[in-house]
Image (tube, rainbow, N blue to C red):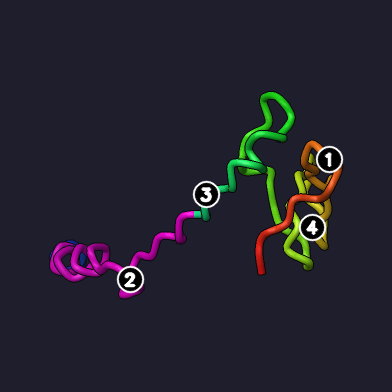
Amino acid sequence: MKKYLLSLGMLPVLAGCAMIQPLIPSTTPPEPEPLPAAVVAVLPAGAPESVVMRDAQGCYLYSIEVTTPPSGFPLRDASGQPICAPR
């Protein structure tokens, strides 16, 4: 009988442990910058904006797969020049 009472006496302690929340604050990732209109205009039909990235020179690329380091196809304007972010 004492064995069962001891077990029941531990329930409040165990219940209190289950309700402890982590002390790590929840952070949300920052919103991505909106793409320039020139980039959106030349994206392939149906391609989401999430496939666009910038290379080391600041030029826009679109990728159809995840690679390390990131790589993709350069986005070019109507004259064939790569579309790059102003520096």
Is the residue marked by circle 4 packed among few (<14), some (14-19), or many (20+) residues within 10 Å? few
Quarter holding the C terminus is bottom right
Between the C-alphas of marks 4 and 3, the distance is 20 Å
- Residue that numbered label 2 is attached to: 25
User: Which numbered mark, 3 or 2, is in the foreground of this view?
Assistant: 3
> Image quarter for residue 56?
bottom right
Q: Give the magenta-colored segment's residue range.
A: 8-31
Q: Earlier in the sequence, mark 2 or mark 4?
A: 2
Check residue 16 for magenta coloring.
yes
User: Which numbered mark, 4 or 3, is in the foreground of this view?
Assistant: 3
What amino acid type is highlighted by mark number 3? Pro
- Residue that numbered label 4 is attached to: 70
Q: Residue at x 68, y 31 (%)?
A: 47
What amino acid type is highlighted by mark number 4? Pro
Residue 66: x and y, percent? 77, 49
User: Which numbered mark, 1 or 4, is in the foreground of this view?
Assistant: 1
Under circle 4, the secondary element is loop
Q: Earlier in the sequence, mark 1 or mark 4?
A: 4
Q: Earlier in the sequence, mark 1 or mark 2?
A: 2
Residue 52: x and y, percent? 68, 47
- Residue that numbered label 1 is attached to: 79
Under circle 1, the secondary element is loop
Between the C-alphas of marks 2 and 4, the distance is 30 Å
